[in-house]
Image (tube, grey):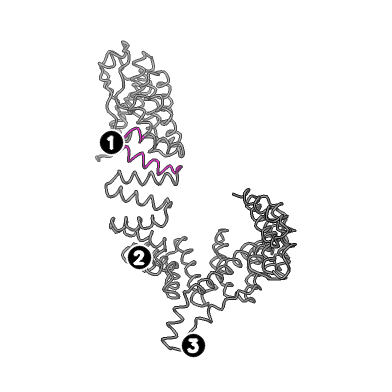
Amino acid sequence: MYAEALNSYQVIVKNKLFTSGGRLKVNMGNIYLKQRNYSKAIKFYRMALDQIPSVHKEMRIKIMENIGVAFIKTGQYTDAISSFELIMSMSPNLKTGFNLILCYFAIGNCEQMKKAFQKLIAVPCEVDYDDKYVSPNDDPHTNLLIEAIKNDSLGQMERERKSMAEEYIMTAAKLIAPVIETSFAVGYDWCVEAVKTSQYVELANDLEINKATTYLRQQDFNQALETLKMFEQKDSNVKSAAATNLSFLYYLENELAQAANYADLAVISDRYNPAALTNKGNTIFAKGDYEKAAEFYKEALGNDSSCTEALYNLGLTYKKLNRIDEALDCFLKLHAILRNSAQVLHQIANIYEIMGDPNRAIEWLLQLISVVPTDPHVLSKLGKLYDNEGDKSQAFHYYYESYRYFPSNIEVIEWLGAYYIDTQFCEKAIEYFERAALILPTQEKWQLMVASCYRRSGNYQKALEKYKVIHRKFPENIECLRFLVHLCTDMGMKEVQEYMTKLKKVEKLKEIREQVSSGGTKGERLNARLKAFPETSEPYESSVCKEIDVSYIDPLGPQAERPKTAARKRAEEDDFADEELGEDMLPE
């Protein structure tokens, strides 16, 4: 209730008898800051600063910090710098030093960034954490006392302060390193040297590893490897961290021998490093020794139960070992930690599918698409499961959504085309089969389906044109020629003789090839068959009154009845019969 609070404060501040009005003006400034009324916030902070006596040094410094933050919010970096510089000269602290670096970064002043960074690392941490908890002797009573006070509230506060200091310095170094020198590598080197001469000397190694990580982000793997290899002679913790990263890099590059070597080095340097144990497990997993890989993942989890990578990989290992219940247990535990992890949700759904529980698989896939609503693979998987369950309408919905996001999946296109054929909407099926023909132009199957859709919908002229196009592209396709003969006969066209001649030639050629491939003297059989062909000027016997032994397969299955012409009746008598679709044409 900011408005009411401001009114109450105004009444009190106006009372001349109240001597602590300056403190209340700080509260009023805070309210304006929360309301994003930065100019009024600055005004009240300055009024408070004027009224608070200089003996209250800590309070005045906090107000100046607030003024600097308000100036940052308004983009007045120069004014903010004035406030922060004043504080750093009077009572330096980590937060103000970090904010000062941010302001110089915002205005692009490289030299001042360096100076501000040096001021930041000069701020005393006031934590003698390492020395305080070292036992001077082996007295059991003293050791127990030290263990007890290590985790008391003061010990926790010291750890938090030290962690905050390290975070400020590391973030500041990562921010300014790419801009203070000609290249980020030179900038990092300057930051490392500056840190080495300060009280935070142990952060220098972390900065070096960060430098290698930056090389990785820039896809410069060789430089990353060179940087990390420098740590092989350093102390065990740093060596373990560098070896872990090296193992990871070599694993990504599929150099499993090198990855295994560095994973071993990382584990030897620090047996309690969960990342090192996970990498070691990964190298063994890649070799197919799943039982041994599982042991390393379990050890990593024993050292750090929150190591999600080890838990995920352990689940994958159990899947490989066909220990499905244990794999499911791993992924369910992981789901409790990572509630919205798409990979975990997918694995759980996949395991339920393997276990033969499609309803549970569908439940988890529905959760998955709430996280990744545009993933075409997940949508098509849902469509497939619903189709297997016999729910065609839901299957169509998810297959269509999958097609919308990725219109190049042949399986999805084929299913949608078949769905429209089943529901007697051949015209709509054409769109999908045409796309399939566009994706796979060398497969005549899709173009034949387009032509059959035209024929089934009664558009015989378009069907004939399409079959002619297919014949020009695939002159030896028997199925296409049979349909051309069939349509030309139905429509009473003269080209029927030409297509019948071509059909018989192609059929005889096919028969010869089959016989040649089945064995015997190839040359003799081929010559005998070729002699049976008439000369190019000599036509085959082709009277329409003669029985035509031409059968064909409709790639789209039986079709609805259409009006019969005299030619069509004669063709039906001549053994033209629609047959059911083969399994290789459309999905079940």
Q: Tell me, yes or no, whether the two marked residues, 3 and 2, touch with CB atoms within 8 Å.
A: no
Give whichever of 191, 51 is nearer the camera.
51
The segment highlighted magenta reads: 373-395
Horizontal relation, residue 534 to residue 520: left or right = right
In the image, which disc is placed on residue 161? none
Comparing labels 1 and 3, the label whose residue is closer to the camera: 3
In three-dimensional space, the C-alpha distance between marks 1 and 2, rounded to whole angstroms, equals: 52 Å
Q: Which residue does the image show at 46% across and 64% down from the upper left?
A: 248
Kindly identify which residue carries mark 2. Answer: 293
| Mark 1 residue type | Glu
In three-dimensional space, the C-alpha distance between marks 1 and 3, rounded to whole angstroms, equals: 93 Å
Kindly identify which residue carries mark 3. Answer: 136
Comparing labels 1 and 2, the label whose residue is closer to the camera: 2
| Mark 2 residue type | Ala
In the image, which disc is placed on residue 514? 1
Give whichever of 373, 234 is nearer the camera.
373
Comparing labels 3 and 2, the label whose residue is closer to the camera: 3
Q: How many marks?
A: 3
Q: Quadrant of residue 530?
A: top left
